[in-house]
Amino acid sequence: MKTGVNSGWSQGASTMLIALGLVCSAGAQTRRFERHFNVQGKPVITVQNATGRIQVRAWDKSEVMVAGQKASASVEVDTEQVGNRIEIATHVISENAGPDALRADYEISVPTESELQVRSDSGNVTVDSVHGDMSFDTVAADLSLQDVEGYMMIKSIGGSTVCTRCAGRLDATSISGNFQLLQPTMDNVRVQTSSGNILFDGGFMNRGIYVLKNYSGTIEVRFSSTDSFDVRATSLYGHVINQAPVVPDRHNMPAQTPRNGMAQSLFGSMNDGRAKVELSSFNGTIKISKRE
Amino acid sequence: MSSNQCAQFERMLEEQPDGPLPALATAHMNRCTDCRLLWSDLEAIRTAGMEWGSEEVAPPQHLWTSLRVQMESEGLIQSRPAGAGWWATWFGAAPRWALAGASISLLLIAGMLATFQANAPAGRDLRAALLPAHFSVAGATKELGATEKLVAADLSKTLDGDLERVFASLPERNPVLATSLRENLGIVDNLIAVCEESVREQPNDEMTRDYLYEAYEQKAVLLATAMDRSESEGQ
């Protein structure tokens, strides 16, 4: 008898678990989304997602695929295609939802030659192998770019950026975000952060212009013996540490020299001085290091 | 000369202030001392006006950026479509009356920066005027007009108050956003304080002033971002 009661409880519990599982599965299905858009040439894709992960990667199809998952029914994903422009946006539809319920994660596949405009507040943004102009507007979201090419414009408040094997041109600002440019092939780089660190680890291209600036933190550029650049480095209240065998500036370019007696400065050329490197910090440390 | 002819001369000047004088008016002016003096005064005013216009300094880029924010917030212009410039995506603020004060602060900053640049005898020398009124920079304050001093005095207070209002309007459901903005505001405020201290010690160092100037710009960017997020996430 007792066994029979236990058996009945067990069967009931199993049934409830299965039903619960089906409900959960159905919920997961409704939260999962996937949409396809046929495009021609170079599409423009805009993404607005306040919270969550955004992954964009290039593929060889003339199609944009937007897949992903939203954390709850409190948010909806809107997509719209107008010609070659695809707009993707996450909207909050329930005011009472908690922070975790508002997350949406995206996996977006785009033609290699696509233009991107991404806006995110928190989460991560990664872009892989896209060749086209792109802009990023983030608050706390970190940004990772890999094998991208084009004109990149980045504005972050606190998010950090890692750019690996990036080519083209970069214009980036942040308040507390760090920037790492690894193996870049860029001829125009302008990076400014207030309290973040900046690392430039790559070759300076002929006629390239590299302007790196911060208030505090460390600016580090790494050079090889074949690099050719003019350098001007000034830290008003910090330090300039130089390992480059620079000689006095061969081009006699006028320099804005600090009147502050505590400032440390370095002006000079390495090899023919073909690229122009300007490093400036308020009270941070500037390192010009030989690449190992 | 008859007052009747003088009245006609003045009426003619009112109707055609910039036009050439008719032959009859010229003939009257040559005979009438009062009208000749009036004409020469008006010529002097016209010449001075043209000289002021020629001395006008081109406003900086960030002035246009801030004006764009204000005009977009009032619906006078729309954000550029996808594929347009980066600044358009930075500051895509939509109308919201609660943020009007903050918009005015942005304009205040832009106006101040433009004014200081326009009045600077040697480019950016008067950027030090960004400092609050209690902070005097030798050689700079004497070149400031009373209005500019007043604006400078109110800037920090007004801006901080608007920032608080905008931050208070950020959606509670995104604490990471609010926390990040507040933390970065603290960083920028600290930078401003450090730069102010440095300018106090090195009032003639242009590079130090540039850092201070840019720190204020960053505060304006932070305010614009907070406004943008407050609006877009509040929908």
Image (spheres, coloured by chain):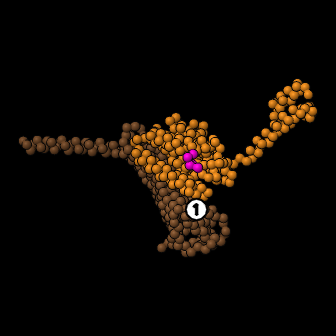
- Residue B135 forms part of the magenta stretch: yes
Q: Toward which corner of the image does residue A254 lie, by quadrant? A: bottom right
Q: Toward which corner of the image does residue A270 lie, by quadrant? A: bottom right
The amino acid marked with disc number 1 is Asn
- Residue B4 forms part of the magenta stretch: no
In front: B171, or B124? B124
Estimate the x, y position of residue A289 in percent, counting from the top left. Answer: 51, 70
In front: A132, or A249? A249
Secondary-structure class at tag 1 = loop
Which residues are the magenta region? B131-136
| Residue marked by disc 1 | A260
Chain of the residue displaying label 1: A
Rendered brown, the chain in question is A
Outermost residue, left side:
A1
Q: Residue at x 60, y 68 (%)?
A: A267
Instruction: Tell me if residue A259 comes above or below residue A32 in the rendering.
Output: below
In front: B82, or A246? A246
In the image, B20: left or right of B139? right
In front: A21, or B203? B203
Instruction: Tell me if residue B122 comes above or below residue A266 in the rendering.
Output: above
Q: Residue at x 63, y 70 (%)?
A: A249
Rendered orange, the chain in question is B
